[in-house]
């Protein structure tokens, strides 16, 4: 099982942001997925972590709810450069946190993959 290290992001927020930035629409499921993906990549670029970052589907273990995660590391070294044994530099994590406008008490953490 793969785990992803990063921040949860709200699907509707990604979609609304993508529509506002004219990355796409929400007319069809395909349009919606494309818009969400482009919005996520734009955030990773803005944070300066596009080469290291990834959008992943994860599950919150307590609630069982499915979420999107902007991840900077993975337990699978084939998925990403940064792993639990080679964590991303703190400045990259902080840059992504700043771009996502996460509160000070919110920290990146490990999330279980849905696949």
Image (spheres, rainbow, N blue to C red):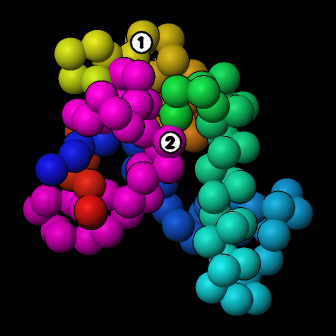
Residue at the extreme left? 62
Magenta stretch: includes residue 76: yes
Left or right: residue 29 compared with residue 104: right
14 in relation to 30, above or below: above
Question: Which is nearer the eye, 95 or 33?
Answer: 33
The C terminus sits in image quarter = bottom left
Q: Quadrant of residue 89?
A: top left
57 in relation to 27, above or below: above
Question: Which is nearer the eye, 106 or 86?
Answer: 86
Q: Which mark is residue 54?
A: 2
In the rendered image, residue 22, in percent from the top left (x then y), is placed at: 88, 63
C-alpha separation, residue under disc 2 versus residue under disc 1: 17 Å
In the rendered image, residue 46, in percent from the top left (x then y), is placed at: 72, 31
In the rendered image, residue 64, in percent from the top left (x then y), is placed at: 18, 70
Determine crowd level at label 2: few under 14, some 14-19, many 20+ residues with C-alpha closer than 10 A.
Answer: many
Determine crowd level at label 1: few under 14, some 14-19, many 20+ residues with C-alpha closer than 10 A.
Answer: few
Secondary structure at numbered mark 1? helix
What is the magenta range?
Answer: 54-82
């Amino acid at each position: 099982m793969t785990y992803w290290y990063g921040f949860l992001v709200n699907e509707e927020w990604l979609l609304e942001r993508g529509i506002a930035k004219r990355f796409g629409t929400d007319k069809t499921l395909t349009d919606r997925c494309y818009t969400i993906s482009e919005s996520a990549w734009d955030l990773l670029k803005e944070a300066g972590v596009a080469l290291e970052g990834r959008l992943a589907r994860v599950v919150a273990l307590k609630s069982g709810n499915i979420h999107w995660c902007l991840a900077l590391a993975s337990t699978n070294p084939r998925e990403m450069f940064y792993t639990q044994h080679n964590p991303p530099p703190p400045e990259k994590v902080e840059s992504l946190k700043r771009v996502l406008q996460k509160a000070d008490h919110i920290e990146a953490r490990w999330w279980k993959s849905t696949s």
